[in-house]
Image: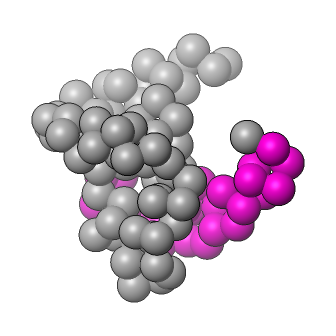
Amino acid sequence: MNEQDESAIEQHDHELHWRCPQLGGEVPFRYCRKLNEGLPCARVLSCWHTVFNVEVFLKRHYDPERLAAVWSRPQSSKLVQLADLVSQAAKRT
């Protein structure tokens, strides 16, 4: 990915969504874009479609196979997701 592509993928990163169904609070698009090991959250289409054309954005910046993998992953419970997020945060610190 070149510098121009990288800045294009970050163009919506600071936009906020009023309520994340997974976390229950306000989150920036950057969080949703990188949630699944660098891939978007499976709910990104339903959460962000009123803010900007997220479907076009995803098709422009991600391979169809990688997006298909995101949509086909089984949804885990909120407790499992929370434990996973805590584990990821602990690894970063």
Q: What is the span of residues highlighted in magenta in the rendered image?
A: 2-30
Q: Is residue 21 magenta?
A: yes
- Give the color scheme: rainbow, by chain, secondary structure or one colour: one colour
Q: Position of residue 71 (x, y in %)?
A: 24, 46
Q: In terms of image quadrants, where is residue 45?
A: bottom left
Q: Please identify the quadrant where the C terminus is shown.
A: top right
Q: Nearer the viewer, residue 6 or 32?
A: 6
Is residue 70 visible from the viewing direction of this image? no
Q: In terms of image quadrants, where is residue 4?
A: bottom right
Q: Vertically, is 83 above or below 81?
A: above
Q: Please identify the quadrant where the N terminus is shown.
A: top right
Which residue is rendered at x = 75% and y = 50% of the image?
6
Q: Position of residue 48 (x, y in %)?
A: 41, 72
Q: Is residue 10 magenta?
A: yes
Q: Residue furthest bottom?
A: 50
Which residue is rendered at x = 49% and y = 23% of the image?
88
Is residue 83 visible from the viewing direction of this image? yes
